[in-house]
Amino acid sequence: MSWATPLVKRGPWWQVCATVSAPAAQRVAELMERLFRSSAVQCTRPNDHRTEISVYVRRVAQGGTNALPAFKRELAALHLPGCATTPGRVRLRRVRPENWGESWKRHFRPLTFGPGLLVKPTWSRRRARTGQAVVVLDPGLSFGTGQHPTTAFCLEQLTAFRPTSGTASALDIGTGSGILAIAAAKLGYAPVEAFDLDAAAIRIARANARRNGVSRVVRVAKQDLTRLPTRPDRHYDVICANLTDDLLLAEAHRIVARLAPGGRLIVAGILRRQFPSIRRFYERLGFRLSWQQSKLGWRSAVLVLAAPAISAQSKGCPPTIERGLRRRV
């Protein structure tokens, strides 16, 4: 769940900040958003690869309940393999209202992805180079501004594969803020479709598409990946699947069914230790690894469908996953 970024005019505000390992950042951000009902800001420190996650709230107490002790308890109980959360590094400080706007500007600066794409907030005066596509996006979701390494990888690959002649279609699974779908449309992909299970994310993605003038190219829908038909009406040249490893395995048949022969599947959101099993699984489905990258504990990759898609069951999928596939089909 995500909430719109609050606007501060008067009165004191508070910053709740937690320092965690990079692979744990998204889970902790979701926990903070749920308890404090405010969007989380992530900032990764380059020197030690740890991530500071902050929320800004008018009151630490929400609905008469002090959320800070509850956050510390749940953070201490959040056990992710290989993702130490250092619950002792939770800080609370008062923020002067006049510094609010500048604090956003310090954290969210223009980002470039290859020579072809610029992502910037509305307050930036950065000008694009000749031939460079521009996406304008303000912070409002913890996941979806291009700051996170998995999102950045997807943007880099969309830029690298941008169509130079003819057309190429794209699908963004779990769109969040809509940044990947919007970038694809700006880079020349068409048609572009995106979906998410979160109704709030759908509203924000559609608003961002309108702001960037691509609402006629990008179709955003509320969909559940686990309930999509296994025989789709359309196939896509590029699919972005910035998903957790369990979804990439359990819903592989639904993802692969939507990829055109020779198409590229961009996978991200995978912890480094989980990637070998993802790679082996998709290679059994007819994919070959084209490119991979590791950053801050995450591994992302481009997989190319080199052969006709084969059902997961017929390729000896792990028993637990195979049973899951049979339940959902």
Image (cartoon, grey):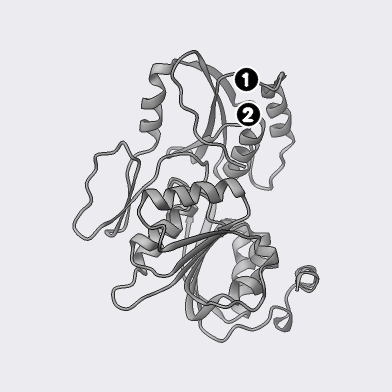
Q: Is residue 204 above or below residue 85?
A: below
Label 2 sits on what residue type? Phe
Query: Is disc 1 placed on a helix, strand or loop?
Result: loop
**Residue 244 placement: quadrant:** bottom right
At 72% from the left edge and 42% from the top edge, which residue is drawn?
Answer: 79
**Residue 155 placement: quadrant:** bottom left
At 68% from the left edge and 24% from the top edge, which residue is drawn?
Answer: 67
Q: Whole-percent x and y of residue 180?
A: 45, 57
Q: Residue 36, which numbered label?
A: 2
Q: Marks 1 and 2: CB-CB under 8 Å?
A: yes
User: Which residue is disc 1 drawn over?
Assistant: 60
Q: Give the distance between the C-alpha atoms of the residues marked 1 and 2, in whole angstroms.
A: 7 Å
Please state, as top left, top right, bottom left or bottom right, where the C terminus lies in the image.
bottom right
First in sequence: mark 1 vs mark 2: 2
Q: Residue 101, which numbered label?
A: none
Residue 238 makes an appearance in the image: yes
Nearest the camera: 93 or 10? 10
Q: How many marks?
A: 2
Q: Is residue 206 above or below residue 105?
A: below
Query: Is disc 2 placed on a helix, strand or loop?
Result: helix
Q: Whole-percent x and y of residue 236?
A: 49, 74
* 14 relative position to 116: left or right: right
Residue lying at the far left in this picture: please name it: 130
Please state, as top left, top right, bottom left or bottom right, where the N terminus lies in the image.
top right
At 38% from the left edge and 38% from the top edge, which residue is drawn?
Answer: 108
Q: Whole-percent x and y of residue 92?
A: 57, 19
Q: Whole-percent x and y of residue 163?
A: 33, 72
